[in-house]
Image (spheres, helix red, strand yellow):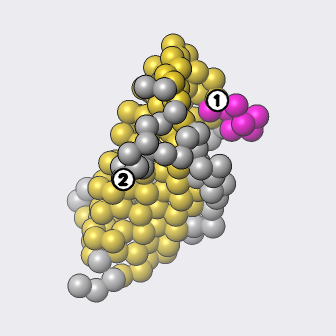
Amino acid sequence: MSTRLAVAEEKFFLSADTISKNEKNNTIKAEGNVSINNKTYKLKANEIIYFLKEKKVFAKGNVIIFQKDGNVIYAAEAELSNNLKNNIIKNLGVLLSDNSRLAASSAESIEDSNKTIYSNVVFTKCKSCTEKSKERVMWKLKAKKATHLKRSKIILYENVFLEAFD
């Protein structure tokens, strides 16, 4: 296995075990230890497909997105714009820079309005939610929808429930 390195027009750096271009479909496919970097984001996945015409990236398998603000997003799959700012992510978990945790069935990030909309959300600031811990999470918020207004650092919850002490 050899690693190849490519530089995209958008000044991203792509590395993977294998990288191939499909002229017919106008796509670039990277598989195995995929990493995409630019100055503000880093994405890792098992596989990505970049659609050149649409300027969209589809990432699958152990997707991890490291953001400049310190947040780390974990997901099964993600659809991202070429600048990694506008995206749709399914089945995600987020470790926020303050060590709080958020999980959702999906999230859509809209950079133009500087917000992220989450569906079926669970949020906690408790640190005891690792699999190995026998302690229960003391409290968590569950909501059908949450909107993160990034500039004002506010999360608005809709149809929300607070679960505490089991």
Residue 69, horizontal then vertical, whole percent: 66, 54
Residue, x 36% and y 61% (percent of image)?
Answer: 45
Q: Measured along the vertical axis of the image, is residue 27 above or below residue 148?
A: below
* Mark 2–mark 1 distance (CA, rounded to whole Å): 29 Å
Q: Nearer the viewer, mark 2 or mark 1?
A: 2
Please tell me whether residue 133 is drawn above or below residue 4 in the rendered image: above
Which numbered disc covers residue 132? 2
Which type of secondary structure does the marked residue at label 1 adopt? strand
- Which residue is situated farthest in the right direction here? 152
Circle 2 Cα neighbour tier, 10 Å, few/some/many (<14 / 14–19 / ≥20): few
What is the count of numbered marks?
2
Quadrant location, the N terminus: bottom left
Residue in the foreground of this view, choosing between 80 and 44 = 44
Give coordinates of residue 21: x percent, y percent.
Answer: 29, 68
Which amino acid is tagged 1? Answer: Ile
x 41%, y 80%: residue: 5
Q: Which residues are magenta?
A: 148-154
Find out whether residue 151 is within the magenta segment: yes
The kind of residue tagged 2 is Lys
- Specify the quadrant of the image occupied by residue 25: bottom left
Give residue 155's mark. Answer: 1
- Say which element carries label 2: loop
Position of residue 78 measured from the top left corner of the image (x, y, whole percent): 39, 47
* Residue plotted at (30% across, 61% down): 47
Q: Earlier in the sequence, mark 2 or mark 1?
A: 2
In screen coordinates, is 76 left or right of 146? Answer: left
Asked if residue 4 can be seen in this view, the reply is yes
Q: Residue furthest top?
A: 159
